[in-house]
Image (spheres, rainbow, N blue to C red):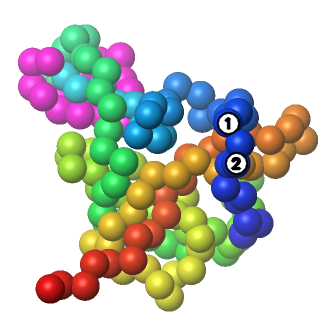
Amino acid sequence: MAQLQMITGKTLPDPLQGGHFHVDPEGPALMGNRCAPCDRVFFPRRDWCACCSSPILDEVTLSRTGKIGAFSLIDRQPADAWVSAPYVQAEIELPEGVSVFTVLHPADTAALSIGQTARLELRALPTPDGTRAVYVFAPVADEVAA
Ligand SMILES: [Zn+2]
Protein backbone atom coordinates (compact mmCIF):
# COMPACT_ATOMS: atom_id res chain seq x y z
CA MET A 1 0.00 0.00 0.00
CA ALA A 2 1.15 3.47 -0.68
CA GLN A 3 1.87 4.99 2.67
CA LEU A 4 -0.91 7.18 3.94
CA GLN A 5 0.87 10.07 5.56
CA MET A 6 -0.04 11.43 8.95
CA ILE A 7 -1.91 14.69 8.73
CA THR A 8 0.32 17.41 10.08
CA GLY A 9 -0.43 21.05 10.63
CA LYS A 10 -3.61 22.60 11.85
CA THR A 11 -5.57 22.49 8.61
CA LEU A 12 -7.52 19.32 7.89
CA PRO A 13 -7.79 18.50 4.18
CA ASP A 14 -11.31 18.02 2.83
CA PRO A 15 -12.57 14.62 3.97
CA LEU A 16 -13.07 11.84 1.44
CA GLN A 17 -15.75 10.25 3.64
CA GLY A 18 -17.62 13.45 4.44
CA GLY A 19 -20.09 13.25 7.30
CA HIS A 20 -18.62 10.05 8.72
CA PHE A 21 -16.31 11.70 11.24
CA HIS A 22 -15.54 14.91 13.01
CA VAL A 23 -12.57 16.26 14.92
CA ASP A 24 -13.06 17.53 18.46
CA PRO A 25 -10.54 18.46 21.17
CA GLU A 26 -9.92 14.74 21.87
CA GLY A 27 -9.13 14.08 18.19
CA PRO A 28 -11.02 12.41 15.35
CA ALA A 29 -14.16 10.41 16.07
CA LEU A 30 -16.64 8.54 13.91
CA MET A 31 -20.25 9.71 13.96
CA GLY A 32 -22.97 7.11 14.28
CA ASN A 33 -26.52 7.20 15.44
CA ARG A 34 -28.55 5.41 18.08
CA CYS A 35 -32.19 4.36 17.81
CA ALA A 36 -34.15 6.07 20.58
CA PRO A 37 -36.76 3.28 21.06
CA CYS A 38 -34.47 0.21 20.90
CA ASP A 39 -30.96 1.63 21.60
CA ARG A 40 -29.33 -0.03 18.57
CA VAL A 41 -26.28 1.86 17.25
CA PHE A 42 -25.43 2.24 13.56
CA PHE A 43 -22.42 3.24 11.52
CA PRO A 44 -22.67 4.73 9.01
CA ARG A 45 -25.71 6.64 10.20
CA ARG A 46 -29.12 5.56 9.00
CA ASP A 47 -32.41 7.40 8.43
CA TRP A 48 -34.40 4.67 10.15
CA CYS A 49 -33.62 1.76 12.48
CA ALA A 50 -32.92 -1.59 10.79
CA CYS A 51 -34.24 -3.40 13.90
CA CYS A 52 -37.50 -1.63 14.76
CA SER A 53 -38.00 0.71 11.76
CA SER A 54 -38.14 3.81 13.96
CA PRO A 55 -37.10 7.07 12.28
CA ILE A 56 -36.07 8.49 15.68
CA LEU A 57 -32.28 8.21 15.80
CA ASP A 58 -29.93 10.44 17.74
CA GLU A 59 -26.42 11.28 16.58
CA VAL A 60 -23.65 9.76 18.73
CA THR A 61 -19.90 10.12 18.81
CA LEU A 62 -18.45 6.62 18.67
CA SER A 63 -15.50 5.29 20.65
CA ARG A 64 -12.10 6.08 19.17
CA THR A 65 -10.76 2.59 19.86
CA GLY A 66 -12.15 -0.88 19.26
CA LYS A 67 -11.08 -4.49 18.86
CA ILE A 68 -10.06 -6.15 15.60
CA GLY A 69 -12.85 -8.65 14.89
CA ALA A 70 -11.53 -9.85 11.53
CA PHE A 71 -9.00 -8.78 8.96
CA SER A 72 -7.88 -9.78 5.47
CA LEU A 73 -5.01 -8.81 3.23
CA ILE A 74 -6.36 -7.47 -0.06
CA ASP A 75 -3.64 -8.07 -2.64
CA ARG A 76 -5.53 -7.30 -5.84
CA GLN A 77 -6.81 -3.84 -6.62
CA PRO A 78 -10.62 -3.55 -6.38
CA ALA A 79 -12.02 -1.19 -8.99
CA ASP A 80 -13.72 1.07 -6.48
CA ALA A 81 -11.17 1.17 -3.63
CA TRP A 82 -9.67 4.51 -2.66
CA VAL A 83 -6.55 2.83 -1.29
CA SER A 84 -3.95 0.97 -3.33
CA ALA A 85 -3.47 -2.79 -2.92
CA PRO A 86 -2.00 -4.47 -1.03
CA TYR A 87 -3.88 -3.24 2.01
CA VAL A 88 -5.65 -4.72 5.02
CA GLN A 89 -9.45 -4.54 5.25
CA ALA A 90 -10.72 -5.07 8.77
CA GLU A 91 -13.81 -5.22 10.92
CA ILE A 92 -13.35 -3.14 14.06
CA GLU A 93 -15.79 -3.91 16.87
CA LEU A 94 -16.61 -0.80 18.88
CA PRO A 95 -17.85 -0.88 22.50
CA GLU A 96 -21.21 0.53 21.33
CA GLY A 97 -21.96 -2.83 19.66
CA VAL A 98 -21.38 -1.66 16.11
CA SER A 99 -18.72 -2.81 13.64
CA VAL A 100 -16.76 -0.53 11.35
CA PHE A 101 -15.49 -2.02 8.09
CA THR A 102 -12.36 -0.06 7.29
CA VAL A 103 -8.75 -0.02 6.24
CA LEU A 104 -6.23 -1.06 8.89
CA HIS A 105 -3.01 0.88 8.50
CA PRO A 106 -0.19 -0.10 8.27
CA ALA A 107 -0.81 -3.30 6.31
CA ASP A 108 1.46 -5.59 8.33
CA THR A 109 -0.62 -8.73 8.84
CA ALA A 110 2.23 -10.45 10.75
CA ALA A 111 1.74 -7.92 13.55
CA LEU A 112 -2.08 -8.27 13.74
CA SER A 113 -4.25 -10.52 15.86
CA ILE A 114 -7.97 -10.94 16.44
CA GLY A 115 -9.01 -9.06 19.56
CA GLN A 116 -6.13 -6.60 19.30
CA THR A 117 -6.94 -2.97 20.04
CA ALA A 118 -7.07 -0.54 17.11
CA ARG A 119 -7.38 3.23 17.25
CA LEU A 120 -9.04 5.63 14.80
CA GLU A 121 -6.66 7.91 12.89
CA LEU A 122 -6.97 10.40 10.08
CA ARG A 123 -4.48 10.12 7.24
CA ALA A 124 -3.70 12.16 4.14
CA LEU A 125 -4.63 10.54 0.83
CA PRO A 126 -3.18 12.09 -2.33
CA THR A 127 -5.81 12.27 -5.09
CA PRO A 128 -5.87 13.89 -8.54
CA ASP A 129 -8.00 16.64 -6.97
CA GLY A 130 -5.63 17.27 -4.05
CA THR A 131 -5.03 15.76 -0.66
CA ARG A 132 -8.07 14.37 1.16
CA ALA A 133 -8.48 13.26 4.77
CA VAL A 134 -9.45 9.62 5.23
CA TYR A 135 -10.11 7.67 8.38
CA VAL A 136 -8.35 4.38 9.04
CA PHE A 137 -7.75 2.32 12.15
CA ALA A 138 -4.21 1.65 13.37
CA PRO A 139 -3.31 -1.39 15.48
CA VAL A 140 -2.16 -0.66 19.01
CA ALA A 141 0.49 -2.84 20.57
CA ASP A 142 -1.23 -5.00 23.18
CA GLU A 143 -0.61 -4.11 26.76
CA VAL A 144 1.47 -6.59 28.71
CA ALA A 145 -0.53 -8.07 31.60
CA ALA A 146 0.90 -7.04 34.93
ZN1 LIG B 1 -34.74 0.63 16.77
Q: Is residue 114 visible?
A: no
> In the drawing, what numbered circle is on residue 85?
none
Residue 3 as seen in the image, left or right of residue 116: right
- Quarter of the image for residue 63 reads top left
Residue 30 as seen in the image, left or right of residue 57: right
SS of the residue under disc 1 = loop
Which stretch did the figure color magenta?
36-51
Q: Is residue 26 a member of the stretch shown in magenta?
A: no
What type of secondary structure mainly makes up the magenta span? loop
Q: Tag 2: residue type?
A: Thr
Q: Position of residue 94 (x, y in %)?
A: 28, 51
Question: Which residue is identified by label 1?
Answer: 10
- Where ligand 1 lies, by quadrant? top left
Front position in the image: 128 or 65: 65
Question: Which residue is identified by label 2?
Answer: 8
Q: Position of residue 80 (x, y in %)?
A: 70, 48
